[in-house]
Amino acid sequence: MCCLKAIFLCLIVVVKIQFCKPTSPTESPSDKSILLDFPDDTLQLILIGKRINNLKRGDIKGFKNLFDIELCNNKIENIEPGTFDILPKLERMNLSENSLTKVENGVFNNLNIRILDLSWNKISVIEETALNDMPELTSLYLGNNEITKWNPNWFQRTPKLIRLVFEHNNLNSLPENAFQNIESTRTDNKTDMCWLDFSYNQITELHPKTFAGVKYAEGINFKNNSISDLPPGLFSSLEKTSLIWFWYNQITCLSDEFLESLPPTLSDNIELDFNPWNCSCVEKSHDWSKAHGKTLSVLITYFDCVVDPLLKDGDAE
Ligand SMILES: *[C@@H]1O[C@H](CO)[C@@H](O)[C@H](O)[C@H]1NC(C)=O
Ligand SMILES: *[C@@H]1O[C@H](CO)[C@@H](O)[C@H](O)[C@H]1NC(C)=O
Ligand SMILES: *[C@@H]1O[C@H](CO)[C@@H](O)[C@H](O)[C@H]1NC(C)=O
Ligand SMILES: *[C@@H]1O[C@H](CO)[C@@H](O)[C@H](O)[C@H]1NC(C)=O
């Protein structure tokens, strides 16, 4: 009996030891407490590749001079609204390579940051007002996420925003008035023109009024999407741009109506290489441009079509 009792106790002890063992790597504890180790006058907080997870109010001290916070490659899934409100000098935030799934209202609003990098997360939801009221924001990086839908109501009162990077997401269309709140596309600022990067999405469709009101843009990038048609009027409000890329899409033809709607300053700034052109249509566009005294960079791709289309058909057989 005594002996049995001893075995029983022994079993309990073993079980207890198992519970107290360090947790397995999948449930490793957070390194969050290291955020509090820094002195109050810290200027830059750079903690890359740690195990910092969900951030709450109070996890970060009210560093009065902190201008740069870089928490790349951590395990952040959630950030409580208000977490960064106590950092009056904050200018740059880099939260790339984490596990954020949404950009919540109240996390970034009213911060005076210039640069916000949220790339390489798992973001699929951006709440409607989450990116409003950022008076100093110039650059927003949201590439390599899982965004499927563009909301034209984003970016209210972000007057300095000039760099929007949304490459490698899952967008499949852009609605009308997509950039109605991007003030830099409305004003002629020779030094700060807007960059819009939508390369490597699954965009099949652009609304004829996607760019309504957009007058100035340094670059517009739609490389590697699945756009098959450029609707007439798409760029009719553009007054100045350096380059627009449509490389690697599914464009076979440009309609006369689209060509006619292009502002005269624009026609040789559209790069249309690597599309599956219909050669007789390209020939038609070529004749059209000659007759109207326009140059089109589609002429570059015209070389794809120098081969007799009939011969190409023959090759395919
Ligand atoms: C953010 O950090 C990553 C990883 O260190 C880096 O590649 C990226 O350029 C940074 N973003 C900005 C805007 O500097
Ligand atoms: C426009 O350019 C000026 C410099 O000429 C600059 O100070 C200002 O911030 C720019 N505006 C925007 C919206 O970026
Ligand atoms: C994307 O672009 C690259 C060139 O940068 C090209 O080689 C590739 O075939 C394109 N991919 C698709 C899916 O179009
Ligand atoms: C190619 O374009 C020509 C001229 O616009 C058109 O008549 C023809 O149907 C098109 N072919 C295909 C396969 O779309």
Image (cartoon, rainbow, N blue to C red):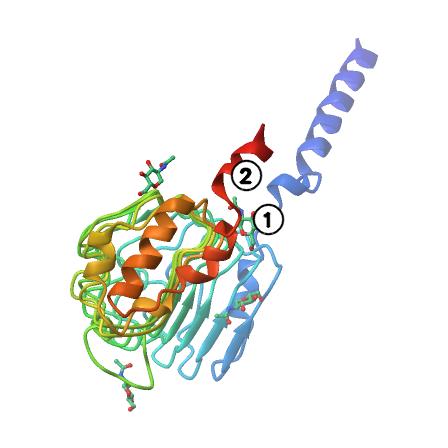
Q: Examine the image and state in which quarter residue 28 appears.
A: top right
List x then y, in percent, for residue 82: 31, 62
The residue to which callout 1 is attached is 29
Q: Which mark is residue 112?
A: none
The residue to which callout 2 is attached is 311
SS at mark 1 in the image: loop
Three-letter residue code for mark 2:
Leu
Quarter occupied by the N terminus: top right
SS at mark 2 in the image: helix
Q: Nearer the viewer, residue 111 or 260?
A: 260
List x then y, in percent, for residue 260: 20, 60
Give left or right: position of 68 versus 150: right
List x then y, in percent, for residue 130: 27, 57
Quarter occupied by the C terminus: top right
Residue drawn at x 48%, y 72% as measured from the top left? 69
For label 1, the crowd category at 10 Å Cα-Cα, with few meaning under 14, some 14 to 19 and many 20 or more, is few
Residue 57 visible in rendering: yes
Q: Nearer the viewer, residue 117 or 163?
A: 163
For label 2, the crowd category at 10 Å Cα-Cα, with few meaning under 14, some 14 to 19 and many 20 or more, is few
Three-letter residue code for mark 1:
Pro
